[in-house]
Amino acid sequence: MSDDEQAAYQVVVNDERQYSLWPAGRDIPPGWHAVGEPGGKDACLDHIARVWTDMRPASLAARMSGPAGNAATNQE
């Protein structure tokens, strides 16, 4: 088993609802916060795959769901 497989990670998310892995026990960078408990790399990646279903940044998703975004999708 490699060191990478044995290392503990933390799932982190930013205000744009973008997810990443961060080494557990290290200070989390500004603008990010921890989600859930630290775990192995595979478990953390599985969690991200389950919850991060819309890869668009939150600000883009909000703009696209607003009146202008809806009008653009309703054009023929």
Image (cartoon, helix red, strand yellow):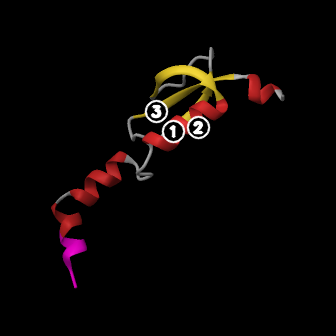
Asked if marks 2 and 1 touch (Cβ < 8 Å), the reply is: yes
Which quadrant of the structure image shows residue 44? Answer: top right
Q: Position of residue 43 (x, y in %)?
A: 60, 31
Q: Which residue type carries mark 1? A: Ile
Q: Quadrant of the C terminus?
A: bottom left
Instruction: Please tell me which residue is depicted at 26% across the width and 56% down the height of the picture.
Output: 63
- Which badge, 1 or 3, comes first in the chain's sequence? 3
Image side of residue 7 versus residue 2, left or right:
left
Q: Which residue is mark 1?
A: 48
Q: Which residue is mark 3?
A: 13
Residue extending farthest to the left is 67
Span shown in magenta:
71-76
Q: Is residue 7 shown in magenta?
A: no
Q: Secondary structure at mark 2?
A: helix
Q: Which residue is mark 2?
A: 45
- Which badge, 3 or 2, comes first in the chain's sequence? 3
